[in-house]
Image: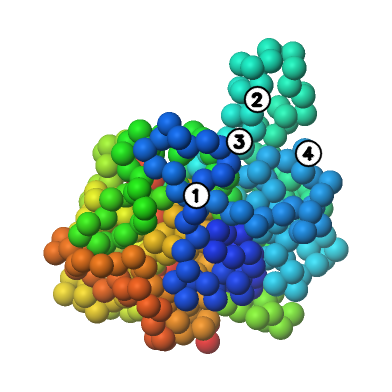
Amino acid sequence: MKKVVITGIGLITSIGIGKEEFWKNLLSGRSGISPVTAFDTKEHFTHLGGEVKNFSPEDMGLSEYIDTCSRASLLAISATKLAIEDSGLNLSAEHPTDTAVCIGTTMGAVQSSEFINEQMVLHGVQQFRREEISKVPTHSTSSIVSRLNKLSGPSMMFSTACAAGNYAIGYGTDLIRLGRAQIALVGGAEPFSKVAFTGFNQFKAVAPEKCQPFDKNRKGMMVAEGAAVLVLESLEHALERGAEIYAEVLGYGLSCDAKHMTTPSVEGIVLCMKKALRYSGITPDEVDYISAHGTGTIANDRAEVAAIKEVFGNRYREIPVSSIKSMLGHTMGAASAIEASACALAIKTGYIPPTINFETPDPDCDVDCVPNVARKQEVYIAMNNSYAFGGNNASLILKKFS
């Protein structure tokens, strides 16, 4: 079976655009949370979120797509452009038929749907532009990534909510291992939306001021947006062209426990992590770092830590377990793709990002969460955890290439 490696990373986040800015700000513990400007939040319980406020499609050379693409698609094609540039590949010329596109999302082009509904209510059904309709289908995001890069290989969207990015990475890995693609553009994209912000506010799941994963006084998550795309290649192809390799994708594990629509299941999370370890051919003793799902809600953090204790036994306190959602907020379908990028960069650079806003230890969440300050530490094998509503769980394993 072919080995699969990461050779390009493209990021659009609230703490930075591009891998260099993102990584510098992540290690410095910078928060991307700020007052929401996309819409008026006066009727909501909270007013902060992780918007990407310095994102400009014009600066990315994508002006012609602004009127025809949803924000989700604009985020995705921008992250893809950065990832391809980082990889040094010329896909349209060299790999038009054997490059796959696999993108995950939770809400998809929800902003376009919101706009259409608003226009219909305010001005009537005849008044909004027909072109808006073409932005709505979720598959339009992966389609525009393929079309823009003149690719005719497999093109897939994954809507497994907050685990969708890991699902997309796992599927792209399988396509390469099975010889159905030489290269895969994989990741996730998520726009900031009224629907998500309102929904999580009504659940009382949003923190009023800051996200504090694993802290005893944590009050919830932060709604956010962003995108990450990674370039996957067969190891043989990457070595042949002398590509820079960030990490090897060892394997992944999936579970869908369907125990509850919103409450995470410890058993389902345990099964997911054990599958990832087994598929990757490693033991729990070999994992050096866990990138936690770590939303900052009471239920999620407690369930994740309980599952980590069961899988890793007495070692659980020795393994750094940090949550970058403390800085970015929860980017939903893009979250695990952004976090996979952070894992790859941690492996490449030998630094582990912190969990910021940590103040008071919680006996139920007594992991080493790398509190507040990044840590210089070699990472050989990292596990990236992601859990979604309905019990859609995905854990990804990355390894240092040598």
Colouring used for the render: rainbow
For disc 4, the marked residue is: 67
Q: CA distance from mark 4 to mark 3?
A: 13 Å
Label 3 vs label 1, nearer the camera: 1
Q: Nearer the viewer, residue 373 or 235?
A: 373
For mark 1, give the secondary structure: strand
Rounded to the nearest angstrom, the CA distance separating label 3 from label 1 is 18 Å
Sequence-earlier tag: 4 or 3: 4
The local crowd at label 1, few if under 14, some if 14 to 19, many if 20 or more residues have their Cα within 10 Å, is: few
254 sits left or right of 72 in the view: left
- Earlier in the chain: of badge 2 and badge 4, it is 4
Which residue matches tag 3? 111
Q: Tell me if I can see residue 279 in this picture.
A: no
> Three-letter amino acid code at disc 3?
Gln
Q: Vertical placement of 389 versus 117: above or below?
A: below
Mark 2 crowdedness (10 Å alpha carbons): few <14, some 14-19, many ≥20: many
Give the number of the mark in front: 4 or 1.
1
Residue at x 66%, y 21% (from the top left corner): 119
Q: Give the structural element (helix, strand or loop) at label 4.
A: loop
The label on residue 116 is: 2
Q: Secondary structure at mark 3?
A: helix
Look at the image and tell me in which quarter the N terminus lies: bottom right
Q: Position of residue 49 (x, y in %)?
A: 47, 49
Q: Residue furthest front?
A: 42
Q: Are marks 3 and 1 in contact (CB under 8 Å)?
A: no
Local secondary structure at mark 2: helix
Amino acid type for the residue under numbered disc 4: Asp
